Amino acid sequence: MKQQVLIIHGGETFAFYDDYLNYLKNYKIDFEKIFGKSQRWKRTLSEDLGDKFEVIQPLMPCPRNAKYIEWKIWVEKYFPYLQKEIILIGHSLGGIFWVKYLSENKFPKKIKQLHLVAPPFNHKELVDFNFCSKKLFKIERQTEQIFLYHSQDDPVVPLSDFEKYAKQLPTAKKIVFQNKGHFLMEHFPEIVRNIKK
């Protein structure tokens, strides 16, 4: 039986609809990404992991104006299809999604690994994705291994957010890079190695 890996991608959140409309008006279209010339590690992960893994990547509802409750409802629809042991990955907003979800809910399967890639830590603009930091101990209670990834040159999530997670999740393996930005590269060999451990 293949080891399942469930990835939640990133997204954007807005407290006010006008801010969302402004974002849409100013957004620059990336034609290489649209026509498949540009790949990101979440798309190449299945191939990089090999045939012993099954990578599940749901497209979360309205990622350009994400709402936590919508993401929660959507991801729970996948639970009946998950095996007894799962590896969870969250990138950026997907990372804080898993943090909030696991600090407020008991996951129905055994979590073998949790990989949090550049997750933001409670900012005003994250609106309903913010969580109670006093509940983060619940994540460690239901997760065998936690990996935190951050890059010092991340233009989206500050290093101080990583440091807050490192303090709140003391058992997590902490990995800091110099030059991976917001982890938008084509391959992520370090996460592949950690998943295969």
Image (tube, grey):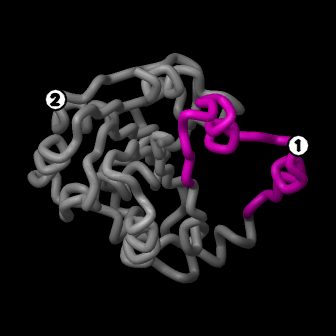
Residue placed furthest toward the top: 178
Q: CA distance from mark 1 to mark 2?
A: 40 Å
- The percent coordinates of residue 125 (x first, y second) are 41, 63
User: Any mark on residue 170, and which?
Assistant: 2
Q: Nearer the viewer, residue 55 or 167?
A: 55
Q: Nearer the viewer, residue 128 or 193?
A: 193
Q: Nearer the viewer, residue 87 or 10?
A: 87
Q: Quadrant of residue 107?
A: bottom left
Crowd rating for badge 1 (residues with CA inside 10 Å; few <14, some 14–19, many 20+): few
Q: Nearer the viewer, residue 164 or 94?
A: 94
- Badge 1 marks a residue whose secondary structure is loop
Asked if 73 appears above or below 41 in the picture, the reply is below
Please check the rendered image and state whether residue 53 is part of the magenta-colored stretch, yes or no: yes
Asked if 23 appears above or below 39 in the picture, the reply is below
- The percent coordinates of residue 182 (x first, y second) are 56, 37
The stretch in magenta equals 27-56
- Rendered residue at 58%/74% (across/down): 62
Asked if 7 appears above or below 14 in the picture, the reply is above
Q: Quadrant of residue 51?
A: top right
Q: Contact, CB < 8 Å: mark 1 with mark 2?
A: no
The three-letter amino acid code for the residue at tag 1 is Lys
Q: Quadrant of residue 97?
A: bottom left
Residue that label 1 marks: 37
- The percent coordinates of residue 91 (x first, y second) are 49, 46
